[in-house]
Amino acid sequence: MTGRHVELAVRARDLTLRSGGRDVLTGVDVDVPVGSMLVVRGRTGSGKTSLLLTLAGRMRPTSGTLRVLGHDLPAQARAVRRRA
């Protein structure tokens, strides 16, 4: 999409989540344009639920940057939770 600005509902860069002493997510990059859908597939235990909970502001990422619906997470997670 060269030359066009695309408004993003979700933008994650190098998102990492550690839980229980192990990496659940590492290096996740995702852009979800407004009005589109994100499909998450994977094996049991691959971190799908953790990723979705993180994007919804319910889990705090260990590192990386995350912006959802114009809000920076985890600082503005409450605003995202109200909308998710």
Image (cartoon, rainbow, N blue to C red):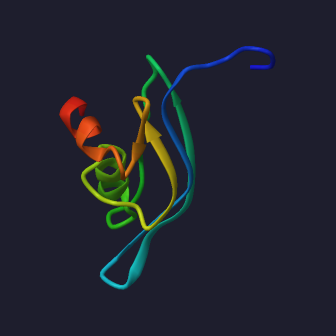
Task: Say left or right for 52 vs 3.
Answer: left
Answer left or right for 32 relative to 55.
Answer: right
Q: Could you tell me if residue 73 is visible in this image?
A: yes
The foreground one among 26 and 40 is 26
Residue 62: percent from the left, percent from the top?
43, 68
Residue 83 in the image: state x and y as whole percent.
Answer: 23, 29
Residue located at (62% from left, 19% from top): 6
Residue 50 in which image quadrant = bottom left
Q: Residue at x 55, y 20 (%)?
A: 7
Q: Is residue 39 visible?
A: no
| Residue in front for this viewpoint, 19 or 83 | 83
- Residue 5 locus on image (x, y percent): 67, 17
In this view, which residue lies farthest toward the right? Answer: 2
Q: Position of residue 48 (x, y in %)?
A: 36, 55
Quarter of the figure that contains the N terminus: top right
Q: Is residue 7 left or right of residue 62?
A: right
**Position above or below: 11 against 21:** above
Q: Is residue 13 above or below residue 10?
A: below
Question: Which residue sits furthest left?
Answer: 82
Tag count in the figure? 0
In the displayed structure, would residue 15 be above or below residue 22? above
Q: Residue at x 80, y 19 (%)?
A: 2
| Nearer to us in this view, 76 or 36 | 76
Q: In which image quadrant can residue 84 be found?
A: top left
Residue at figure coordinates x 48%, y 47% from the top left = 66
Q: Is residue 6 left or right of residue 22?
A: right
Picture layout, residue 59 above or below residue 83: below
Farthest front residue?
Answer: 75
